[in-house]
Amino acid sequence: MTAPQRRRGSLAAGSLLAAVVLAAFLPVVLGRRSFFHLDLYYEHLPVWAATQRALRAGASPFWLDGEYCGQPSLFIQEAPLFYPPMVPLLETGAPVHRLADAFLLFHYWLAGLAAFLFVRHETGRGLAGLFGGIAWMLSARMIQSATWPNAVAVGALLPLLLLGLSWIGRGRSRNGVLLLAGSGGLALLAARPHVLVAAVPVLAAMTLVAVWAAPRRLRAAGDVLLAAVLALLLGAPSWMPSAALLPETSLASGLRPAERDVRALATGPDLELVFLPFDGIRRWPETAAYPGVAAGLLFLAGVVVLFRKSGASRTAFAALAAGGAVGFLFAFGEKGPYGLFAGLPLLSGFRVPARYLFSWSLALALGSALVLGWWLARSRRPRLTGVACVLVLAADLVVHARSAAPTAPEAVYRIEPALVAELSGVLGRDSLGFPRRYVSVADTIYPIYYSGDDLLRMARRFEPMKFSLGMRFGLESVNGYGPTLSGTSELLSHWTARSAALAGVGAVVESAPAGPGEPPGVARRPVVRTFPGLPRAILVPEARIAAPGDALRAVLDPALDPLRTVVLESGEPFARGPAWDDGSASVKLLAHRPGHLSLEASLPDRGALVIFDSWEAGWKGTVDGRIVDVERADGAFRALRLSAGAHHVELDYRARGVPEGFGLAVVGLLGATLAARRLPAAGAIPSDILRADSA
């Protein structure tokens, strides 16, 4: 097949795959429905909204004021800022739910195209490639991953990683290294490492087979290693900030076995989702893996047929089958063989072993397509057979996607819950002009269990504004979703009137009391109770020193007055000076935006400026233009030591690891350029791979 023929075939396949995506998600494309699930609604899109506001206001997108008393955005990157499409999308200013729809639709199409390219390369059959593209992009594993948009992005890139490995195994060093490094770097920039970990069984199996089958094994092993290093360098802008933040987060010591073995795959209803089209928005998304009847049958046939035959298809199928089987077994968690590895450093923070079904699903989608390619090569009517198989699979998976994809009426995102206006009226700003925070302890309504008008009614009248949802509407809360900074996490786990006051809570959202004779489980409207939280910034005349592990205990001691004493974790303590007068100590807020604070403070004697926003080592401070330390205060917050007199104080957030990450990415680009110039373009490629696409 000539290069122009391959390009025309790719263009035709891309167009057909786009048509299938259109058919599967037509209500989303037309704007009648949007992708919808708990994590998407309560976590990802609120972060997208807050990040969009920061970018468009010229503020730092690396600090989120709206959750957990302030949170760095580069540890759990729900909005992967360094993934190329992300910032341009947000900068459009369009509603974030429609941006997420566009992001997901594009990556479903990309997943299909990537799988097509891999299968066509392995079989030389365009129809087999089209089958594999549909099988992967509309697999239940990919469809149910819509609740995490960047997971779909990484999933879309996985077949390109396999294609790069295959090229290396066939002696195409230059193309293989560049594709493997580029797609691997993009996968890291997409910032969903769980998907890459979940795909390790298939990637490892394909690597071993590619190196073993290579004409020059040592050269192939070196190429894989080079590509892995380049991918790490290219993805450094994403993973380096996360790595720098890890020691300060609640995941620093990994997860306990019970925490990391959450919802492992089990026999019974879980296996329905693996083998049958019984998934949907109300089922547990992590265990969904339905591959389509045609794909499942072809894969089973491959186990019988291809293991008896020789050739390139057999080698690739064996790698996929082995990796998929390991992924399936690992999905059973620590009660299975995965228990031997789960405690290793890189895996101890990995939650939900069912995610290893990414390996299983990818193996079934691509492996079944390889079997189809083998069948077409021996069929008397390859075109008719291939078209029939593609149509049967497409009809099956399009119907499945239309019924099972996690979507809801688009109007649910345009509804402003009644609680938003009520909270906005009650919270206002504190005496310095900082927005006051709220905390929601009301019952969760779980909107995925409602549909149609009931969903819209619940979203409008009964939404308790939990998790990170407040950020979508410009509110700040102490709630959040997912891991956070360890100090904040510990403070909020000891929920008392003292911790609420320190967190600047101005309102508490609770569920209304049940009425007389009201049955349990009936949704109740949330009610708001005001709370006298402290101002977000205060001046105190004295400081105590406590070890990091004891600071929070000290500040929660009722005998300590946080308006008088701050608990620091380093330096020297100081007592109230003789000239201190509470009436003449004052602080004034000059500017407040994400990642930046500007204040004026006047002190009659030395003291400390305490800011009840989360501390993180990336915060840098200046006092009258002089750099000073921003210390951890009261276990979770920030403080600066000040001398007597009037001072101008500036605090700016500098996300650690970003400059270093971009520096490594530049090295990676230079390395990729050098590899493109020095590595051989091609080696010995089997002739059956280069034959014309007669199908």
Image (spheres, rainbow, N blue to C red):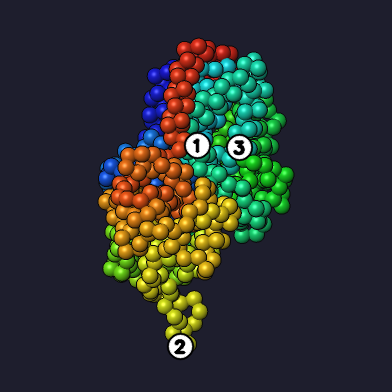
Q: Camera-side residue: 383 or 4?
A: 4
Tell me: 340 left or right of 227: right
Above or below, 411 relative to 62: below
**In terms of sequence position, does the residue under pointer 3 or pointer 2 come before the other?**
3
What numbered label is drawn on residue 364?
Answer: none
Q: CA distance from mark 3 to mark 2?
A: 55 Å
**Which one is nearer the viewer's eye here, 654 or 162?**
654
Q: Disc 3 residue type?
A: Val
Circle 3 residue: 200
| Residue at (55% x, 39% y) in the render | 196
Asked which secondary structure carries label 3, the reply is helix
Q: Which residue is mark 2?
A: 516
Residue underneath mark 1: 239
Residue 87 falls in image quadrant: top left
Residue drawn where x is 53% and y is 50% of the image: 569
Q: Position of residue 481 (x, y in %)?
A: 47, 56
